[in-house]
Image: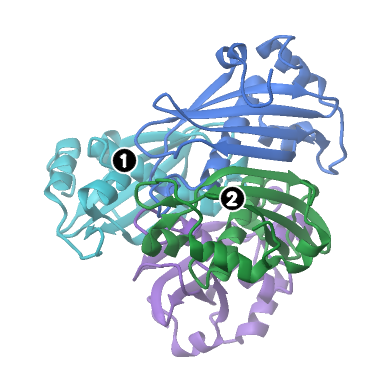
Chain colours: A cyan, B blue, C green, D purple
């Protein structure tokens, strides 16, 4: 796998989610605002975890399960403007799982055209307290179950 | 029709839209932030117009059709906290259509429990220029077609 | 005091706060987005409480002091578009304090021109638990100290 | 200059801006939400340009000057949680100016503690039309005037 994108194999396996883009998402340049795009990407990741972990997304992790996964790194590469009129389709897949961290890759397209790619690294911590912990076993098992033992996990 | 809610008849006819509530929508009190709720309500209205006007939502109105509909009034009554874990279901219907203005009513529920109601008044204006204009005939006709000639139109 | 605005006396006493309006606050119509305006108004209220209560704004209320003040009602009347290039100046003052609730009025101007007015009603509750409680004595005393015993308190 | 931070010299020259962090900026984990941090960083960049270009920030660029500077890349490294109670202080400085692009580096601290660093690359384009153009001469000259001819420009 190169650093710059999903492998073909990853793309077919990736988690997919789509979202409408509307007037309130856009700025005076008439395209989706960069700050909004980072928020939409984060929302896609929240949905990803909710799906992979059977409903235990960020909210329940933090409020019921005693752990959170704050970001230590995010990066986004913008390829083409995101505009209203056609849904924004996200693909999310794990790229690497370390001892305490997980790296996800994300791509977003509209009308079959790639709009941006992104990469996010989170570490697992206790809540409250924010002490770093190993990747919880339920997380590791769920990723392996969904993406296979070969998916960088 | 009273000022405080939908009539039974309106409720069955109302436009419906639903949206996930996630971690990023919530504040340190663990419930959806008030400012987020007003944004979600506005997004529901944007979807309402896009549906009623066959795709001519706020974005295309402003950028292609030469008119916009800025708000002159909004009010929201919060009945119960909005939380993650179950979709937020919006109902939107016109309450009154004047010469240059339209008033929409909105309600939002989760799990069958009413969370908030809202009322919004917009006036129609040219873009650019922001000169007040009568409700465009395509808007009036579309509302009558969707909600019937009796729906305060 | 009429329902539609501050009395002269209130205006001179009102808490003032100002904020820059930028590109990311604006929508494709080139003016500040309505959803952003409600967020800016809420931020002004948060600053108001932080100032009146010597640093005990919404965050510390919820996380340290065991109470919160969720909104039960908000309304905004938009008089003129908010645009970048000159600060948005907020005035906030209490309008009424009840047994468990407080109503604040807010106005916002740019370049000496009134842009919108708003009214917000919050009730006081325990956190966690969300049980309604009387207006905390420290809140009542702080409002009286800042706005005088006549300010609807 | 290394890729991972400002040089000592850059730090003293960097543009500084600070902003309050409030309740609405935070999530159920009790810290500023990652999506909010990216928005605050973007706001700091908008202020940076407004200052460097004597008021010609993103809004006036797009609406009056016929050019914009959409992002092609952004990355953020989070070092410590951002919390309410003390201002978030941004430092922004140019790292490299190419033919059509500019790379800015940003760091943000609270109470003297580094919270995150970030790097942003924008390209200059016409508005409307989004045709790539060389870095406008007024931009190049303003950066040289503010940061000196040696600042990667």
Tell me if B67 is positioned left or right of A19 in this view.
right
Is residue B118 something one can see in this rendering?
yes
Q: How many marks?
A: 2
User: In which quadrant is the C terminus of chain C drawn?
Assistant: bottom right
- Number of other residues with Cα within 10 Å of mark 1, as a class: few under 14, some 14 to 19, many 20 or more: many
Q: Relative to residue B96, is residue B70 depicted above or below?
A: below
Q: Residue at x 70, y 61 (%)?
A: C151
Q: Residue at x 62, y 31 (%)?
A: B45
Q: Residue at x 63, y 55 (%)?
A: C41
Tell me how far mark 2 sits from mark 1, CA to CA: 45 Å
Q: Nearer the viewer, residue B116 or B103?
A: B116
x and y percent of residue A108 in the render? 43, 42
Tell me if A15 is positioned left or right of D109 in this view.
left
Q: Quadrant of residue A22?
A: top right
x and y percent of residue D134 in the render? 65, 64
x and y percent of residue D31 in the render? 38, 62
Q: Nearer the viewer, residue A15 or A22?
A: A22
Is residue D121 something one can see in this rendering?
no
Q: Secondary structure at mark 2?
A: loop
What's the chain of the residue with tag 2?
Answer: C
Q: Quadrant of residue A68?
A: bottom left
What's the chain of the residue with tag 1?
Answer: A
- Same chain letter for marks 2 and 1: no
Residue bearing the label numbered 1 = A48
Residue bearing the label numbered 2 = C98
Q: Relative to residue B56, is residue B29 depicted above or below?
A: below
Q: Secondary structure at mark 1?
A: helix
Task: Say if mark 2 contacts mark 1, CB within 8 Å.
Answer: no
Q: Residue at x 40, y 46 (%)?
A: C130
Tell me if C63 is positioned left or right of C53 in this view.
left
């Amino acid at each position: 796998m190169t650093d710059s994108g999903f492998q073909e194999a990853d793309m077919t396996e990736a988690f997919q989610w789509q979202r409408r883009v509307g007037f309130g998402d856009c700025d005076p340049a008439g395209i989706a605002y960069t700050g909004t795009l980072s928020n939409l990407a984060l929302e896609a990741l929240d949905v990803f975890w909710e799906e992979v972990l059977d409903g235990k997304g960020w909210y329940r992790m933090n409020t019921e399960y005693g752990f959170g996964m704050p970001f230590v790194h995010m990066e986004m590469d913008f390829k083409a403007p995101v505009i209203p009129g056609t849904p924004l389709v996200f693909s999310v897949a794990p790229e690497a799982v370390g001892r305490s961290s997980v790296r996800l890759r994300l791509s977003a397209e509209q009308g079959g055209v790639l709009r941006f790619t992104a990469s996010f690294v989170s570490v697992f911590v206790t809540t409250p307290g924010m002490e770093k912990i190993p990747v919880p076993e339920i997380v590791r098992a769920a990723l392996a179950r969904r993406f296979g033992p070969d998916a960088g996990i």
